[in-house]
Amino acid sequence: MAASGGKARLDERGRVVLPADLRRRLEMQPGDELVITEEPGGSVRLQSRRSAAHALLGLAGRLEHSAVDDLRTDRRRDTATDAVETGSA
C-alpha cells in the first residue's frame, strides 16, 4: 500500500486532528491509543497500538510448534530432575 497523508494543524493545546479519510482507511476509532515516535530528521511517526503489536509479532516470526507444548516438556523434565535429585523417583 502506498503511503498517503494529508495536512493537519496543531492547536493551542497541542492536539492534532487526523483527516477523516485516513482514520477510516486505518480503521481508527475514538479512544484508540497511538504510539508516537520521533524519527531522524525531525519527523514524527504515529502508529496504532494494534499496528505496533502486529509489527512486533511479525518480528518474532511464526512458531513451527506450540510454545505451550515446549513449556509442558520443560516442566516435566524439571519435575523428573527434581525427583531424581531428592530421591523420590
Image: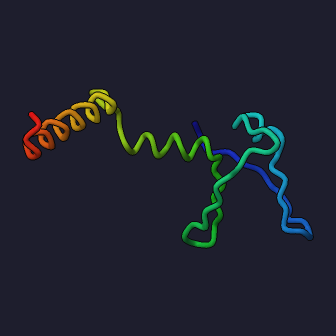
Above or below for 39 versus 3: below
Does residue 37 appear left or right of residue 64 in this picture?
right
The image quarter containing residue 1 is top right
The residue nearer to you, when weighing 66 against 7, is 66
Q: Give x and y (percent) for residue 79.
A: 19, 38
Q: Residue at x 65, y 63 (%)?
A: 44
Q: Residue reaching furthest front?
A: 88
Q: Residue reaching furthest right?
A: 12
The image quarter containing residue 77 is top left
Does residue 23 appear left or right of residue 63 in this picture?
right
Q: Quadrant of the C terminus?
A: top left
Q: Give the number of marks.
A: 0
Q: Give x and y (percent) for residue 56.
A: 46, 46
Does residue 38 appear left or right of residue 76 in this picture?
right
The residue nearer to you, when weighing 66 against 40, is 66
Q: Residue at x 71, y 49 (%)?
A: 33
Q: Residue at x 80, y 55 (%)?
A: 7
Above or below for 63 versus 31: above
Q: Give x and y (percent) for residue 30.
A: 82, 42
Q: Is the image coloured rainbow, by chain, by secondary structure, or in one colour?
A: rainbow
The image quarter containing residue 28 is top right
Above or below for 54 versus 16: above
Above or below for 83 versus 39: above
The residue nearer to you, when weighing 10 against 57, is 57
